[in-house]
Every structure is written in structure tokens, then in C-alpha cells.
Image: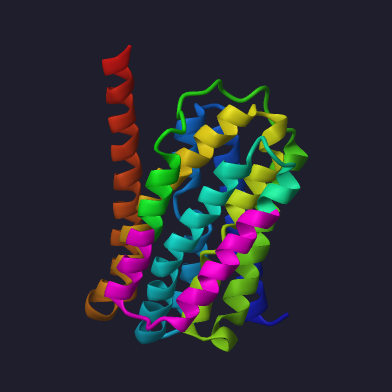
């Protein structure tokens, strides 16, 4: 069997295991912590590992610019989902949210791939997310019970398939499109699909609102690859981006804990 195919399969399996583990963690934490963890670049990081191994620094940097702008698409995906949870069946919620992601992704594809443009897209989407979610409570009961093993496997498998597909087609899609699809919200979609069995509508909205805030952790990862990759090397930039993402997630958790102590 061709080595490239084995490499794609290996990274898909790695992403599947990682997402499955994160989902299991979500069910042992509050909706807020679960949402913050879910928003980490769980799927995009394994996808970029493969892209880095097979593409040059220029390709990776341009793909990262596409992914950075697509943070705005994911924010609008979450805006749509939060607005419709409890009003429509989850299938309809995800279809509408995916529609928002696709429309925004098409707009991003038509825009110049430049750092200021990516940050402008994030700023506009961030303002929309803040305005629409400012009154969404982020305190809700924890999940009811825990998922059986096959649900965790299914969620992880969906993430693994995305990593394999994006990694395998990156050289055909071109860097900007590859970057956009590397940020496809597969982890959010697979988790949302099963959340009604574990959380009430208020808990789902709290988790998704936390995921909106946690999307900030994607910014250092993509910006690091785009700005530092061609200068200091892709792997050092990748490592710094991961550390930056984890730092933001930890900071958000600490700030949330302090806030809860003040109002207790």
C-alpha cells in the first residue's frame, strides 16, 4: 500500500482518537469548560501536520490565512446554532448553521488572502457573535450521564474522515480552499448532533456560547503559521501556535472561574 495513503489514514485515526477523548472530557466538565475545550484546534492541527509534511512554507502560510479568516465562518455557524437551538430539531439547526458557514466561506474565498483581511473578517463576525450572544447564560446543568462508547467512536470517526479528506486533497484544492476546509466545523457538528441526549437547550446554548468565546484560541495557531512559518520554520511556528492556543484556553478558564467566585 502507498505510504501516503497510510500516512493519511494514520492522521485520520489520530484525529478520531483526539476528538473522542475531548468529547469524553466534555461530559465530565461544565458546559462552559466543555465548550472552551471543544473550540481548541482539535481537528485542524492534525490536518496541518499532514499539510506541513507535504507542502512548502508558502503553501502552508496561505492556507493558514484562509483558515484564519474561516474563524469568522465558524463564529457565524455558532451564532446560527445558538439562535435556533430549542426552536428547531437539531438536524434543522445544523443544516441552517452549515448554510451560514458555506455562505461565509464562499465570501472568504473571493477575498484577497491577506492578514489584515483575515483579521477584518474575524472582527466583523466577532462583533456579530458578541451582540447576538451577550444575553446567553453560560451557566447550566452538567450533562446527563455519559455517552456510550459507540457515540464517542462515531464523533471521532467523523473528525478523522475530515482530516484524511482535507489532507489528501490539499494539493488539488489549492492553499486557500484547503485552509478553509481544514477549518470545517466537523467537531462542532458531531458533538451538537448528540448534545440533545445529554443537555437541555439551555446547556447546549451555554456550551456553544463558550465555544464562540473559545474560538479565540484558533487565532494564535493560524496567525503563527501564516506569519512565523516562512521566517522561523513551519514546525517551530506550529509549536508556538499550539502553545498560544492552549494559553488562551487556560486563560479563559481562569477568568471564568474568577468571575464565578465573585458572583458566588
Which quadrant, please, contains the C terminus? Answer: top left
Magenta part mainly helix, strand or loop? helix
Occupied quadrant, residue 6: bottom right
Count the labels in the image. Answer: 0
Magenta residue check for 68 = no
Looking at this rendering, what residue extends furthest in the top direction?
Answer: 264
The structure residue drawn at horizontal position 45% and vertical position 55%, both measured from the top left corner, is 41
Occupied quadrant, residue 114: bottom left
Occupied quadrant, residue 71: bottom left
- 50 with respect to 243 (left or right): right
Which quadrant, please, contains the N terminus? Answer: bottom right
Tell me where residue 252 appears, x and y as whole percent: 32, 38
- 257 with respect to 72 (left or right): left
Residue 10 can be seen in this image? no
Task: Using the image as rendered, state which of residue 153 and residue 253 is in the foreground.
Answer: 253
Coloring basis for residues: rainbow
Tell me where residue 16 appears, x and y as whole percent: 63, 54
Magenta residue check for 98 = yes
The structure residue drawn at horizontal position 47% and vertical position 48%, both measured from the top left corner, is 39
The structure residue drawn at horizontal position 59% and vertical position 40%, both measured from the top left corner, is 23
Looking at this rendering, what residue extends furthest in the left direction?
Answer: 231
Give above or below for 173 relative to 189: below
Give above or below for 48 relative to 147: below
- 164 with respect to 205 (left or right): right
Tell me where residue 230 appears, x and y as whole percent: 28, 81
Give above or below for 88 relative to 159: above
Tell me where residue 17 appears, x and y as whole percent: 61, 50
Q: Where are the magenta residues, as a range?
A: 95-124
The structure residue drawn at horizontal position 55% and vertical position 42%, both measured from the top left corner, is 22
Residue 88 can be seen in this image? yes
Task: Using the image as rendered, state which of residue 30 and residue 228 is in the foreground.
Answer: 30
Amino acid at each position: 500500500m502507498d505510504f501516503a495513503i497510510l500516512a493519511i489514514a494514520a492522521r485520520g485515526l489520530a484525529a478520531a482518537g483526539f476528538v473522542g477523548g475531548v468529547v469524553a472530557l466534555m461530559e465530565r466538565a461544565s458546559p462552559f469548560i466543555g465548550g472552551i475545550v471543544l473550540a481548541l484546534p482539535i481537528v485542524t492541527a492534525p490536518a496541518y501536520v499532514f499539510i506541513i509534511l507535504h507542502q512548502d512554507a508558502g503553501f502552508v502560510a496561505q492556507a493558514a490565512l484562509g483558515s484564519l479568516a474561516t474563524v469568522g465562518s465558524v463564529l457565524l455557524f455558532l451564532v446560527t446554532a445558538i439562535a435556533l437551538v430549542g426552536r428547531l430539531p437539531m438536524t434543522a439547526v445544523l443544516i441552517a448553521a452549515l448554510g451560514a458557514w458555506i455562505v461565509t466561506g464562499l465570501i472568504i474565498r473571493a477575498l484577497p488572502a491577506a492578514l489584515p483581511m483575515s483579521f477584518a473578517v474575524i472582527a466583523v463576525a466577532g462583533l456579530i457573535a458578541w451582540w447576538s450572544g451577550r444575553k446567553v447564560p453560560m451557566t447550566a446543568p452538567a450533562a446527563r450521564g455519559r455517552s456510550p462508547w459507540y457515540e464517542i467512536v462515531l464523533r471521532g470517526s467523523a473528525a478523522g474522515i475530515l482530516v484524511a479528506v482535507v489532507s489528501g486533497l490539499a494539493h488539488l484544492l489549492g492553499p486557500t480552499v484547503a485552509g478553509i476546509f481544514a477549518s470545517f466545523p466537523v467537531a462542532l457538528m458531531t458533538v451538537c448532533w448528540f448534545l440533545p441526549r445529554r443537555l437541555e437547550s439551555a446547556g447546549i446554548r451555554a456550551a456553544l456560547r463558550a465555544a464562540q468565546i473559545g474560538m479565540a484560541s484558533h487565532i494564535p495557531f493560524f496567525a503563527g503559521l501564516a506569519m512565523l512559518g516562512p521566517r522561523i520554520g513551519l514546525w517551530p511556528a506550529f509549536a508556538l501556535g499550539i502553545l498560544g492556543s492552549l494559553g488562551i484556553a487556560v486563560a479563559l478558564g481562569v477568568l471564568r472561574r474568577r468571575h464565578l467566585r465573585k458572583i458566588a
